[in-house]
Image: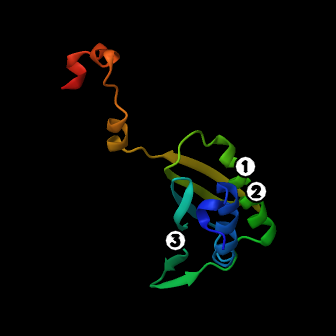
């Protein structure tokens, strides 16, 4: 059986969009997010406000992304992975909205680092003394 960590990040993003297909078909705007740890997508989903309130009641959105718009969105998400550099932990979010019949997407790639991991690799050799004391506290 194939495990998630054996799949490329691009393949995982593709699987996320397949899983969200039904939900996206009912939304015309929102943010798709994916939390990444060791280049494996863990948590993912959509942040959105699907209800509009007027005169004391809520109405659900009627039109969501068409299959062509979802395909375009998925391709843009896959294309954005080319801008991910060296980091393995973080979050990718895609803010989307339908404008004039086309889906517009803004991608945000957020890297996360852990100071504890950095301290393990901190210089202890002859160059460690090159850091002025005022920066070391």
Q: CA distance from mark 2 to mark 3?
A: 24 Å
Q: Assess whether mark 3 and mark 1 are in contact (beta carbons under 8 angstroms).
A: no
Can you identify the residue that label 2 sits on? 75
Labels 2 and 3: the sequence-earlier one: 3
Q: Quadrant of residue 78?
A: bottom right
Instruction: Tell whether 64 sits left or right of 109.
Output: right
Q: Check if mark 1's residue and mark 2's residue have beta carbons within 8 Å.
A: yes
Instruction: Out of 24 and 127, give the one closest to the viewer.
Output: 127
Q: Residue at x 34, y 38 (%)?
A: 120
**Relative to 1, residue 29 above or below:** above
Label 2 SS: helix
Res. 47 visible in picture: no
Which numbered tag is attached to residue 49?
3
Q: Residues within 10 Å of mark 3 (few under 14, many from 20)?
A: few
Q: Quadrant of the N terminus?
A: bottom right
Q: Nearer the viewer, mark 1 or mark 3?
A: 1
Distance between the alpha carbons at the discs numbered 1 and 3: 26 Å
> How many neighbours does mark 2 have within 10 angstroms: few (below 14), some (14-19), or many (20 or more)?
few
- Check disc 1 and report its element: helix, strand or loop: helix
How many angstroms separate mark 1 from mark 2 (CA)? Answer: 6 Å
Q: Nearer the viewer, mark 2 or mark 3?
A: 2
- 67 or 117, which lies in front? 117
Which residue is rendered at x = 61% and y = 50% of the image?
A: 107
Height in image: 108 above or below 66?
Answer: above
Colour option used = rainbow
Mark drawn on residue 97: none
Q: Quadrant of residue 5?
A: bottom right
Which residue is at a point 53% across and 77% down the rendered structure image?
A: 51
């Amino acid at each position: 059986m194939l495990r998630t960590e054996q799949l490329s990040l691009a393949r995982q993003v593709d699987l996320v969009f397949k899983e969200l297909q039904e939900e996206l078909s009912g939304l015309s705007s929102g943010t798709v997010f994916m939390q990444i740890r060791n280049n494996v997508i863990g948590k993912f989903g959509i942040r959105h406000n699907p209800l509009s309130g007027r005169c004391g009641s809520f109405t659900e959105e009627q039109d969501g992304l068409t299959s062509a718009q979802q395909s375009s969105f998925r391709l843009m998400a896959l294309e954005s992975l080319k801008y991910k550099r060296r980091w393995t932990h973080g979050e990718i979010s895609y803010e989307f909205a339908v404008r004039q019949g086309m889906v517009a997407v803004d991608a945000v790639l957020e890297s996360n680092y852990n100071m504890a991991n950095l301290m393990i690799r901190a210089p202890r050799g002859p160059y460690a003394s090159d850091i002025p004391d005022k920066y070391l506290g």
